[in-house]
Amino acid sequence: MPGSGGQGRAVSRRRLLVATASVAGVAAAGFGGAYELVSHGIVPGQSALDRIDGACSVARTDFSYPAALGPTLSGTSYSAARGREVGYAIGYPPGFGPGDPLPLVVMLHGFGGNHLSALASLTPAQAVALRDADGRPLPPMALATVDGGNGYWNPHPGDNPMAMLVDELIPRCARLGLGRGGRIGAMGISMGGYGALLLAEQHPALVRAVAAISPAIWTSYAQARAANGGAYASLAAFTAADVVTHARALAKVAVRVASGTGDPFYPGVRALAAALPAGAVADFAKGCHDGPFFASQEPPSLRFLAAHLSR
């Protein structure tokens, strides 16, 4: 048929671009959330096309931090809640260190990550040393990361990362003078963004503010199980830890959520935003579930938390 050859070549080229971009995206992602999406088949071909068409491009975020950073306290300890040794790190702002009373941000890592990779583009010490484009620093606060495994920060048989946060990490930080007087914030990316919301919902008297970047939110147990069978131990576990259903628990918590419109989790984040109490901040912008979007959202998320924790 006349013209059919050209159409076939165009379709084949588009498929080739999808395949090439998919492979390149996996190689370049280097982050737990992206790894999870690919490994569980959540990222469709459209995501690769979005990258080609520029839908994943994000605006540059201007920020800096000084050459002389604050110290980082790191180590390992046995977690009774998780039944294993876990690593942790606590970053301090310039001019502060262990023993100084400061607000605390608990930063949760994504799927496939650990305490060393919780942030997409910064170390804990760099994160709390950020300066605005005009050179103004964040109000002083510390930031702690810890190994939470791949169980979506909710309880599994023999492994309860949420109890580790509440009963072990936060009390450890309090003994160092951090987060006292209710000055505790939660933050996370992808699986960690979901976990930060879960922490705030289940412990609203403990967490004053939460910032979730590209939170990995499913709207049904069937959807979650099909994508990642290890995310929840059972339907009952999903029901108890469904952050959309329990969003009203955040009525007295300052909330900021951000998601790219090209993110496969975008529908779930939209559902969450619709359920959040009045006053919550929802930032939806062009971007995908990838490092550039995560990195672009770290400075405004940290500024949001600092503003609420310094009051």
Image: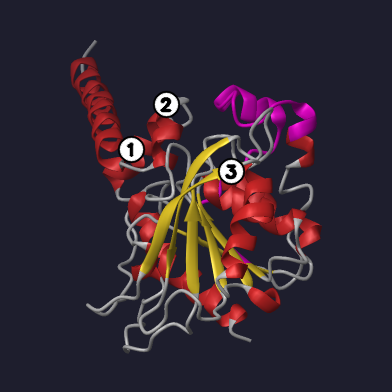
Residue type, numbered disc 2: Ser
Going from the N terminus, do you reach mark 1 or mark 3 first?
Answer: 1
Q: Determine whether the residue tagged by mark 3 lies in a helix, strand or loop.
A: strand
Q: Which mark is residue 39?
A: 2
Q: In this view, does 289 lie to the left or right of 292?
A: right
Relative image position of residue 105 (x, y in whole percent):
54, 67
Up the image or down, 297 lies above or below 166; here it is: below
Which quarter of the figure is the N terminus placed in? top left
Going from the N terminus, do you reach mark 2 or mark 3 first?
Answer: 2
Q: Mark 2 touching mark 3, by CB under 8 A?
A: no
Relative image position of residue 261 (x, y in whole percent):
48, 51
Residue shown at 59% from the left, 39% from the top: 152
Determine if the magenta segment contains residue 46. Answer: no
Q: Residues within 10 Å of mark 1 (few under 14, many from 20)?
A: some
* Viewer-closest of 175 and 157: 175
Up the image or down, 303 lies above or below 207; here it is: below
Going from the N terminus, do you reach mark 1 or mark 2 first?
Answer: 2
Q: Which mark is residue 49?
A: 1
Residue shown at 62% from the left, 61% from the top: 170
Relative image position of residue 279 (x, y in whole percent):
71, 73
As measured in the structure, the alpha-carbon distance from the residue carrying label 1 to the one carrying label 3 is 43 Å
Relative image position of residue 29 (x, y in whole percent):
31, 41
Magenta segment: 210-237
Determine if the magenta segment contains residue 221. Answer: yes
Residue beneath disc 3: 79
As measured in the structure, the alpha-carbon distance from the residue carrying label 1 to the one carrying label 2 is 18 Å
Residue shown at 54% from the left, 75% from the top: 304
Q: Which of labels 1 and 3 is toward the front?
A: 3
Q: Which of labels 1 and 2 is toward the front?
A: 2
